Amino acid sequence: MTGRKKVILDVDTGVDDALAIILAVTSGQLDILGITTVSGNVSLDQATLNTCKILELLGVSGQIPVCRGADQPLLRESVFEHRVHGKDGIGGALADMVVTQQAEAERAEDFIIRQVLAQPGEVTLIMTAPLTNLARALHKCPELTRHAAEVIVMGGVVQGFGNITPTAEYNMYADPEAAKLVLAAGFPRLTLVGLDVTRKALLSAEDIAKLQVPAIREYVEKSTADYRTRYYERNGVQACALHDPLAVGVALNRSFVTVHDFYVDVETRSDLCDGQTVCDFQNRLGKPANAGVCLEVDAPAFLKGFINSLNQGRTKDGSH
């Protein structure tokens, strides 16, 4: 027994998914059973390639299986976020990197099902992308809900505005039917890490300067450059939000966030509000809570942990 928490990361590797993978690997606290990819910020092919590039950068290529998942949402057309994440999804960083790892033949949803059923009550699913893969897994294996240790979802916003429409957070908006299905599935422990907290976990140029592993610092600086510019244009802050890394942070140390249990659903039939996460704060619907919703975050503590973790990382060339 390693004593490390067993996790599967489900990603659509754009800028912040990549940082989440780096945090998960460098932390040394997680037994990463595999990484599943899905269409979201970028195409499935690009998300898979980016994931393999990050594993190559970290010197762990071939050590963590990567499984391809859904190449489009359950019912809708894909909505990519190239303006935020760059044409390649990671801001043009690692453009010349040669990737040696190939994706596994096993499909993402089958990998999730197999791992969770083989280790009941032990596997935490960290979902930092549209929830298409998990929805497909639940369709094949509804009893998955009884066997997952926890599902941590970077998605939604319950007390603020959206980041792709006035009301919707991107991951929920990209496949709201999948999100609705996952929230209704009955996972006994599902945690929503939404924009309410991720917008407070900001990475600035000063923070990047604290990174001590040259290859990681250079990668983070380059990959987030346009991302930080876009964030400044929209929010007036010289930084970028660590949306997906905070979901990994919650898996590493739940005390980073304050969580309250509520009933949460997702709007799927609205011209203006598709993808909105509706949180029943006053129990007006009379339905039992189905999610732990993160409402507050100790951002300085998380950021310190993030930087410390990345500073423990090794890279392909052995630099430390």
Image (cartoon, helix red, strand yellow):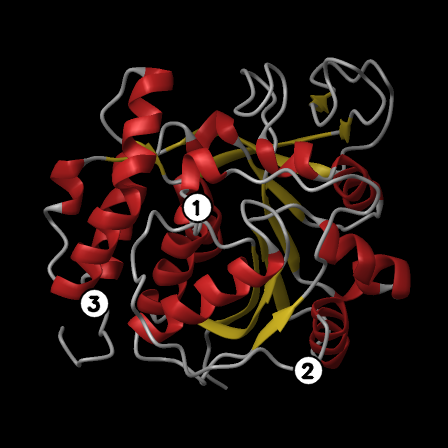
Viewport quadrant of the C terminus = bottom left
Position of 139 with respect to 93 (left or right) is: right
Q: Which amino acid does label 2 sit on?
A: Ala
Residue at 29% in and 55% down: 93
Q: Is mark 2 on a helix, strand or loop?
A: loop
Is residue 144 visible in this depiction of the protein? yes
Task: Determine crowd level at label 3: few under 14, some 14-19, many 20+ residues with C-alpha closer than 10 A.
Answer: some
Instruction: State the image coordinates of residue 213 (x, y, percent, origin top left).
Output: 14, 64
Classify 45 as above or below 319: above
Instruction: State the image coordinates of residue 219 (x, y, percent, origin top left).
Output: 24, 57
Q: Name the residue under label 1.
A: 87
Is residue 213 visible in this depiction of the protein? no
Tell whether label 2 touches label 1 (CB within 8 Å). Answer: no
Q: Which numbered disc, 1 or 2, marks the residue closer to the eye?
A: 1
Instruction: State the image coordinates of residue 41 (x, y, percent, origin top left).
Output: 54, 45
Q: Mark 3 points at which residue?
A: 312
Q: Which numbered disc, 3 or 1, marks the residue closer to the eye?
A: 1
Q: Which numbered disc, 2 or 3, marks the residue closer to the eye?
A: 2
Q: Mark 2 points at which residue?
A: 105
**Residue 22, quarter of picture:** bottom left
Task: Determine crowd level at label 2: few under 14, some 14-19, many 20+ residues with C-alpha closer than 10 A.
Answer: few
Disc marking residue 236: none
Classify 62 as above or below 248: below
Q: Which amino acid does label 3 sit on?
A: Gln
Residue at 84% in and 47% down: 185
Q: Which of marks 1 and 2 is nearer the N terminus?
A: 1
Question: Label 1 to label 2, Cα distance in Å?
Answer: 27 Å
Q: Which amino acid does label 1 sit on?
A: Lys
Residue at 49% in and 55% down: 13
Q: Is mark 1 on a helix, strand or loop?
A: loop
Task: Determine crowd level at label 1: few under 14, some 14-19, many 20+ residues with C-alpha closer than 10 A.
Answer: some
Instruction: State the image coordinates of residue 237 (x, y, percent, origin top left).
Output: 26, 20
